[in-house]
Image (cartoon, helix red, strand yellow):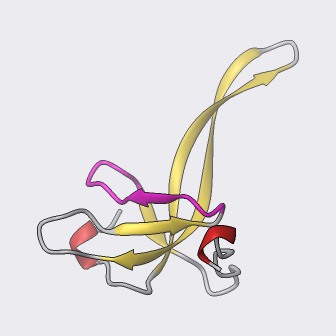
Amino acid sequence: MSNVTELEPGDRIEIRYRSAATVPGAGEEQRDRWIAAEVKSIDGGRWPLARLADGQLTEVRRYMEWRYASAHLRPPRPHPKSA
């Protein structure tokens, strides 16, 4: 995992999140998923702000696991309200 201080506006990253999924016959299990994002801004003294592929904005915090996006990933879709 890289350090959030390495991020710059325009960087394409993926952020990992864990969600519970119901598995027939096995109950619930945790699944890891990665969501594409683009770093939008970095203001001094604040966490980098990234727009997720689904249009939401999030801060990239120290505890979050992220990685630079692969070249084959499509860019995040623009949020309908920002168009």
Residue 55, above or below 23: below
Q: Is residue 44 left or right of residue 65?
A: left
Identify the residue at the far left of this view.
Answer: 45
Q: Is residue 49 left or right of residue 68?
A: left
Q: Which residue sits at x=21%, y=75%?
A: 43
Q: Position of residue 26 (x, y in %)?
A: 79, 14
The answer to whether any part of residue 43 appears in the image is yes
Residue 72 drawn in magenta: no
Q: Which residues are magenta?
A: 54-65
Q: Which residue sits at x=11%, y=67%?
A: 45
The answer to whether any part of residue 3 appears in the image is no
Identify the residue at the far right of this view.
Answer: 24
Q: Position of residue 69 (x, y in %)?
A: 55, 76
The image quadrant that residue 31 belongs to is: top right
Q: Which residue sits at x=41%, y=78%?
A: 40
Quadrant showing the C terminus: bottom right
Magenta span main SS: loop
Q: Position of residue 59 (x, y in %)?
A: 36, 58
Residue 57, above or below 6: above
> 45 or 36: which is nearer to us?
45
Q: Give the mark count.
A: 0
> 29 or 83: which is nearer to us?
83
Residue 30, above or below 13: above
